[in-house]
Amino acid sequence: MRAARLQTGAVEKSLTPISPPVGVPAAKLLLHPNLFWQNELNWQPVVQAQERGIDGSLHVDAWVRQAGRPIELRGDAAWISRSDLRTLLTWAGTPGLKLTLWWLGAHYQVVFDAGEDGTRAVESRPVFAYSDITDDELHTSLVLRFLTVE
């Protein structure tokens, strides 16, 4: 059943920039169905801080995170054209650009996560390494990192 849904296109995976600045591609970009959300079930929306009182009692403050959920999409066989990869790199290189990520019937408002530790927001390796690659050539081993902003 899952394979049939992917083949018919009923389950869309795509990115669309929200109000991109002039010169930044604004079209919707379809993502390969082989991408998977690697850290989907690792999110903990409730955060708490614990502190001991002077009498030894435990004080716990808890709150719900409003944003900042990490989303890491990966695919060893998530083929993408060089031109689409360039679009992703342009978006990732535009500070503060918000995008709508459509993922299996849900949508998320996200920004690219470049990370303070030097982690790259977009990673890809060419399928075949040769010098005269064209924009229609495909890449694989795609990794996309985002943070939710709403």
Image (cartoon, grey):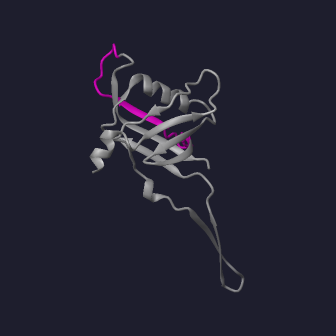
Write down the quadrant of residue 19 in the picture: top right
Please give left or right for residue 95 compared with residue 9 in the image: right
Measured from the top left, where is residue 54 in percent x and y?
72, 82
Measured from the top left, where is residue 140 in percent x and y?
33, 32
Measured from the top left, where is residue 10 in percent x and y?
38, 43
Which is the main secondary structure of the residues drawn in magenta? loop
Instruction: Please state which of residues 137 and 122 is positioned toward the viewer in this rendering.
Output: 137
Q: Classify 59 as above or below 129.
A: below
Instruction: Please state which of residues 11 and 25 is positioned toward the viewer in this rendering.
Output: 11
Write down the quadrant of residue 142 in the picture: top left
Q: Say whether residue 125 is magenta.
A: yes
Please give left or right for residue 99 compared with residue 82 in the image: right
Please give left or right for residue 122 compared with residue 17 in the image: left
Task: Give the residue displayed 48% in from the left and 43% down from the top.
Answer: 102
Please give left or right for residue 86 compared with residue 137 in the image: right
Instruction: Please state which of residues 104 and 49 is positioned toward the viewer in this rendering.
Output: 104
Task: Give the residue displayed 42% in from the left and 48% down from the top.
Answer: 104
Residue segment shown in magenta: 111-133
Query: Hey, which residue is sitting farthest bottom in the picture?
Result: 55
